[in-house]
Image (cartoon, rainbow, N blue to C red):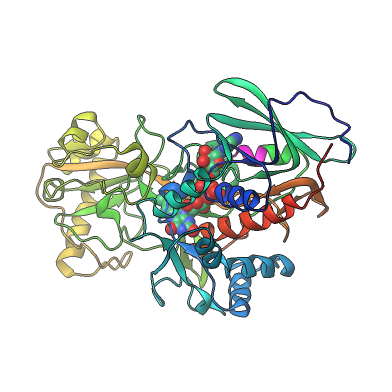
Amino acid sequence: MKSEVLFEANAEADIVVIGFGGAGAATAIAAHDMGAKVIILEKAPKGLEGGNTRVSGQGYLNVDGVEDAVDYLNALAGSEELPQNHVRAWVMECSQNNDWMRSIGATPEEHHHQPVGIEFPELKGSQCVRKFHHGPRTGYSHTWDFLAGAVAERSIEVLYDARASKLIQEGMSREILGVQASCAGQPITVRARKAVVLACGGFENNQSMIRDYLPGVSACYPSGTPYNEGDGVHMALAVGADLWHMKNFAGPSMALKVNEYQSTFSMTALHFSHEQRGGMIVVGPDGRRFTDEKYKTLHGKVRRSGEWHTLALPTAMYMVFDHALFSDGPIYDKEPRMNWSRVVDRYQWSDDNVAELDKGWIKKGDSIENLAEVLGLDPQALKRTCDEWNVICANGRDDHFGRTRMLNPIERGPFYAVPLVASLLNTQGGPRRNARAQVVAPDGEPIPRLYSAGELGSIFGYLYQGAGNIGECLATGRIAARNAVSEPVID
Ligand SMILES: Cc1cc2nc3c(=O)[nH]c(=O)nc-3n(C[C@H](O)[C@H](O)[C@H](O)COP(=O)(O)OP(=O)(O)OC[C@H]3O[C@@H](n4cnc5c(N)ncnc54)[C@H](O)[C@@H]3O)c2cc1C
């Protein structure tokens, strides 16, 4: 096949993979092991690669029972009719994740044993859910470290600080021939002899896309990598791709966001299973509570009117608490198990919360009314809410929102507050792909030589099953690699 587009390339490979997270790693390893020369372009500087995969809980799905898994995936899609050849290909590949991981040297361990790990047990086929990770325990980047190590021990070139910005497309055939990028600030062009695979994650750190696409939040900040800014969506749109599942995301939750860091900080007191000393509530800009602060959403989904919806959060939120909680140890969980702030930024929160009080991350008032003034809230409204909360605690029953954990009154000052934002794990939307992991145009026709893998254009458009994203990274990475490697070389 002869390319009609001539361009000077700084580098070339059979397969050019954009993004070095789980999907990029799986694609690169699989393509390399099939004999292809692979280059990965990674936007983050060396040391900050790995994307959401690196800071995730590390669990991946290995579905058990193909027919059950087909039923479950269809049920999770709700009213959407997914293409059944795509569902079947996804499920078949996900059922082989452990075999593949073992074949490249991993030791899969099962966690969240049933029924714990099943997110929607009421849905048909849900018994297919089996969740695994590499290494001694979940979290702590174990699965990621294994994948990164497998890339490092192969002759796969990784260009760091290399942000892909544009796909090079031949005008008539619409074939994708390579990528334009900036590498350490210099423009470069990378030629793909066979195909380009987009594995560059979602738009978790792009506020304008979040405003346009995500329901229930007007702003939302990543708990994962700050480098996923929707570049894959923009590159795919520019070459004629269709989009799907743009409104679906894993979130929101409530977390602290400070100017010094791009990713959010999780507050221990807000964790659904965590009990600690002291009183704590969350209020909106009207000084009123709006939810059970300790509710365990299903990756952001809550049941309303007999259906699952995205939890809606006010833009401004404040975690209000008393001195008993303030003096009960760090209010931030600094264990480097997951989240970018804990695993990569490694911010060392003080043991007595005083450094963060001094920085202004925690606000303080001698009385509830004084705290409200500091926050710019109506003092009487906040006082009323705290008084109501104390009555709820005395009665041991939250008739407003049904909260059952940490029913501790907010009684003794000084009083404190942490301003909160909506936070997310990851977005699911992106270019629509087919059963062969080809990116397709609105007419359903594949854009020649363009593939995608991972959360960028995930199959999850409505409900999400935990461990499904990394399961999908491994599965779609291998599907994309197989089909991309079988493309004829462009002369
Ligand atoms: C805290 C947390 C916990 C989670 N826990 C789990 C879990 O246990 N199980 C599960 O299945 N899912 C989990 N998820 C979701 C899951 O981690 C992600 O959906 C999945 O890892 C996405 O993998 P990916 O390879 O598609 O993208 P990523 O891992 O995010 O990798 C994308 C890479 O592309 C790079 N990139 C972006 N733009 C460009 C560009 N223009 N050019 C070059 N490179 C670019 C980024 O820097 C990044 O390195 C969790 C997410 C978070 C944040």
In the image, is 207 to the left or to the right of 443?
A: left
Q: Is residue 231 in view from this perspective?
A: yes
Left or right, 340 with reference to 212: left
Task: Tell me if I can see residue 429 in this picture.
Answer: no
Q: Which residue lies furthest to the left in this view?
A: 412
Indicate the position of residue 382 as horizontal and vertical percent values: 25, 47
Residue at image point 24% right, 31% down: 360
Q: Disc count in the image?
A: 0
* Residue 232 counted in the magenta span: yes
Give residue 43's quadrant in the image. top right
Residue at image point 20% right, 63% down: 407
In the rendered image, the residue lying farthest to the top is: 186
Q: Give the range drawn in magenta.
A: 229-234
Secondary structure mostly seen in magenta is: helix
Percent from the top left, x then y, of residue 201?
56, 45
Left or right of 416 on screen, residue 120 = right
Question: Looking at the rendering, which quadrant does residue 260 occupy?
Answer: top left
Quadrant containing the N terminus is top right
Comparing 418 with 88, the one in front is 88
In the image shown, does 141 or 373 lie closer to the viewer?
A: 141
Residue 16 forms part of the magenta stretch = no
Q: Which of 83 and 410 is in front in this view?
A: 83
In the image, residue 315 sits, relative to residue 57, either above or below, namely above
In which quadrant will I find the C terminus?
top right
**Spot occupied by residue 41 in the image (x, y as percentages of width and height):** 59, 35
x, y percentage for residue 34? 67, 53
In the picture shown, does residue 161 fall above or below 196? above
Vertical order, 87 against 1 (above or below): below
Q: Which residue is drawn at 36% across and 50% down?
A: 338
